[in-house]
Image (cartoon, rainbow, N blue to C red):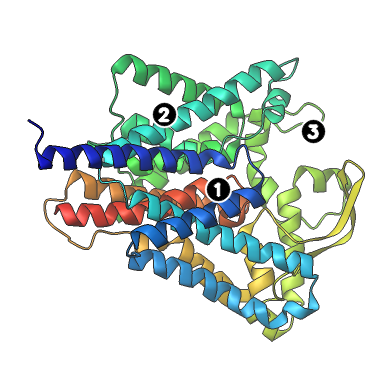
Amino acid sequence: MITSKSLQLRREQKRNKINSLIFATLIALNLVVPESLYSAILLVTCIIYLTFYKTKIHKGLKAQTLLLCAMVAPGLLLIGQNEVNNALKDVWYVAKAVLCLLCGYLIASRIKNTQELIKTFIWTCFIVCSFYLINYFVAFNDSAMQAAYDSGSIPMFCCIGFGLAICGQGNYRFDTSKPLKYIALAVMGAAFLLSFSRSLQGTFLIFLLSLAGLFDSTKKTAVSLMLLTMASITIYSILPEYNQNDVSFLGKIKNSISEVSFTKSYDEQEITTNWRGFEASQAQKQFESASTFEKLFGRGLGATVDLGFYVHMGEGLTYRHLPILHNAYYQVLTKFGLLGLFFYALFILGPILFGSTTKNKKPESAEAINIRRASIGLAISLAYTSVTITGAFNKSLVDGLLFISGALYALILNSNKKN
């Protein structure tokens, strides 16, 4: 005999599976659809969920959204003196970040079985990495790095899926058979190694260390950073020198610090080698020559960084004024000033500042531990990617991190209800 309670349980299980699939589909959808269409799909999804389910928005999510709005507000003061097309693009980048946060939250708030969500998400990361490996071996000819370049990029959300598959605890563990788990780990591990992406591998390392609890306290963080620094110095000393005529991944790793550091050289080869650092140095130079008002509030939406001369960017394109930088901090500083940079820093710290459980019970539950560690990992990951690939304003690669940041707030509410 089927009771009303069993029917309700079945409906809830079905709802969990459907919403987990929607979550996994949307987080990976921007790999196959244009960014503008992806943003429109996110907007429609948010409207549907808000209309039909009237979900209460977590105060932490509201705070992060308001921080982005506060960051952009000074930029509106000077919008008239910049190119309209660039200004609209800036608005789109910020709006897309808000949509990713909100969409992740609204969908995850309909999922009561955290383990169902985690398992579906990890298998999605496995599928994404599998397709990457297929493309890699199809594209492979003589150069492994060229094959990686031709195969496209692995999105940053796969770092979280891979990390959870390795050391997720409690409801956040990868709930599947050991043979399938080992296959999934092997595929994701191979994809990460063959991506030759320093940003991807760095983000994965950050999140893995965070999930392992190495950033749980000030003492643990200090010890972890000290050991990482010692290991980095040792590894750095034995890496091969960077050779632009014969580029290797290990050489690129050794050149990483130089690549993001300031360079005032106008030598074409050095600019090409250390492009990120050249962008930042020109942005810093422009900031130093700005008025006090522009230093505080920026040069407005659509503002660009003057490189000082025209630079050949490939495919017959030359640029002198850059609307987008690899370094998100300098991008925000240019457009929204020191005040905007302050709000962006708070936005990055959002998962830590607003992502703690409201019921601080002792001993801490496994779910609360996972949420806290994920919050720390997401914040550090956003801070790191803001140096290398424009952070929250990346065209598509970081969308998944924001999606999961939004989902985290829903998991917090579910955790509090259980407690």
Q: Which residue is mark 3?
A: 244
Measured in 3D between alpha carbons, the distance from the residue under mark 3 to the one under mark 2, in whole angstroms, is 38 Å
Please rate how many residues cluster around mark 2, counting C-alpha atoms within 10 Å: few if below 14, some from 14 to 19, many from 20: some
Which secondary structure, mark 3? loop
Q: Which residue is mark 2?
A: 123
Task: For residue 80, say whether it is visible.
Answer: yes
332 left or right of 288?
left
Measured in 3D between alpha carbons, the distance from the residue under mark 1 to the one under mark 3, in whole angstroms, is 28 Å
Q: Quadrant of residue 61?
A: bottom left
Q: Position of residue 92 (x, y in %)?
A: 64, 61
Which secondary structure, mark 1? loop
Please rate how many residues cluster around mark 1, counting C-alpha atoms within 10 Å: few if below 14, some from 14 to 19, many from 20: many
For the point 62% across and 80% down, the residue is 74
Identify the mark at residue 398; answer none if there is no mark.
1
Task: For residue 230, say whether it is visible.
Answer: no
Q: At label 1, which amino acid type do we have? A: Val
The mark that comes first in sequence, 1 or 2, is 2
- Quadrant of the drawing holding the N terminus: top left
The mark that comes first in sequence, 3 or 2, is 2
Seen in the picture, residue 328 relative to 190 is either above or below; the reply is: below
Which secondary structure, mark 2? helix
- Select label 1 or label 3 by which is in front: 1
Q: Position of residue 58 (x, y in %)?
A: 33, 64
Q: At label 2, which amino acid type do we have? A: Trp
Q: Position of residue 361 (x, y in %)?
A: 13, 57
